[in-house]
């Protein structure tokens, strides 16, 4: 018979699965709408031409990556303070997805740059700091397995997860602080967006779709992580269980 704690945990996993599936369905519908808007609704930008349509994947991917690493920083800070394994699990899952979406940013950026600037890569401030962010969170995973003591590895990674998030506002402000080839904001401006209404609408739908996709994937990954940790705890408990004479086949 299941223990009460296990039953509660099973209930929380079922809830996470349901939310993940529900949000995944909304994300799929939003993504279909997003790509319809990108290819059939939004006008072609006058200066950059059709390559500008990458913008509606590039920018939402960056937004989701920043959100993911923000979650990593907050949960890591909570883990350092409370030593709550649930916070560490959320931080780990968010960091994985943050790396995925940062990789999308670093892929779509050069595709855009090649067609717009004639070069796959330029050492632009925003591109350079984004690449640094990617390496920081690769280091996050390396630190987790760098020590024989798993708890120490988690603490070291949590510290890096908190410190690494300081790169996010630098990336955001880099086009204002440094000379940059990267386009300046046309939507998030204090005086209001200067882009065409169709572009703003398409970007907002894309941001919603990518956010729903991220949350859905985060919940699904968290279910897998919780199950994995439960199995690991059961394995450790089994190896530490004392061997009785009966288990050795000795009659008494």
Image (cartoon, rainbow, N blue to C red):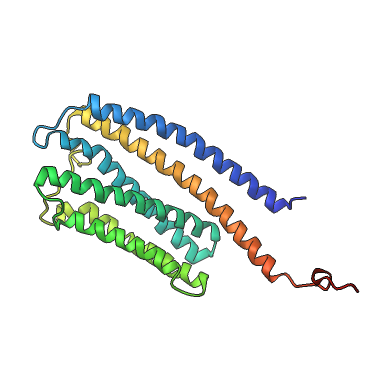
Give the percent coordinates (x, y) of residue 215: 44, 43
For this view, does 93 lie left or right of residue 33?
right
**Residue 138 in view, yes or no:** yes
Is 59 rendered above or below residue 158? above
Give the percent coordinates (x, y) of residue 49: 12, 34
For this view, does 88 lie left or right of residue 73?
right
Give the percent coordinates (x, y) of residue 155: 46, 69
- Asked whether 190 or 67 is in front, the reply is 67
- Asked whether 108 or 180 is in front, the reply is 108
* Residue at (20, 58) in percent of width and height: 128
Q: Quadrant of the C terminus?
A: bottom right
**Residue 184 in view, yes or no:** no
Give the residue at the far top of this rendering. Answer: 40
How many numbered callouts?
0
* Residue at (64, 63) in percent of width and height: 235
Give the residue at the far right of this rendering. Answer: 252
* Residue at (17, 37) in percent of width and height: 52
Give the percent coordinates (x, y) of residue 5: 69, 53
Is 146 rendered above or below residue 182? below
- The image quadrant that residue 201 belongs to is top left
* Residue at (19, 45) in percent of width and height: 111
């Amino acid at each position: 018979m299941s223990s009460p704690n296990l039953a509660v945990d099973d209930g929380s996993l079922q809830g996470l699965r349901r939310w993940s599936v529900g949000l995944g369905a909304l994300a799929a519908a939003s993504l279909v709408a997003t790509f319809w808007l990108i290819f059939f609704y939004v006008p072609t930008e006058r200066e950059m031409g059709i390559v500008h349509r990458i913008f509606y994947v590039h920018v939402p991917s960056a937004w989701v990556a920043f959100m993911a690493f923000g979650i990593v920083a907050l949960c890591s800070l909570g883990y350092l303070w409370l030593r709550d394994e649930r916070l560490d699990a959320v931080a780990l899952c968010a960091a994985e997805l943050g790396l995925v979406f940062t990789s999308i940013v670093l892929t779509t950026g050069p595709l855009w740059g090649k067609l717009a600037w004639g070069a796959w890569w330029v050492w632009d401030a925003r591109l350079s700091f984004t690449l640094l962010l990617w390496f920081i969170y690769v280091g996050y995973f390396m630190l987790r397995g760098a020590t024989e003591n798993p708890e120490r590895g988690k603490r070291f990674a949590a510290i890096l997860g908190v410190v690494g998030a300081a790169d996010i506002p630098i990336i955001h402000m880099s086009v204002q602080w440094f000379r940059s080839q990267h386009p300046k904001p046309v939507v998030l401006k204090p005086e209001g967006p200067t882009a065409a209404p169709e572009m703003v609408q398409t970007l907002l739908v894309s941001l919603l779709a990518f956010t729903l996709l991220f949350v859905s994937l985060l919940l699904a990954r968290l279910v897998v992580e919780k199950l994995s940790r439960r199995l690991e705890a059961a394995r450790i408990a089994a190896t530490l269980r004392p061997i009785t004479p009966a288990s050795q086949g000795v009659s008494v």
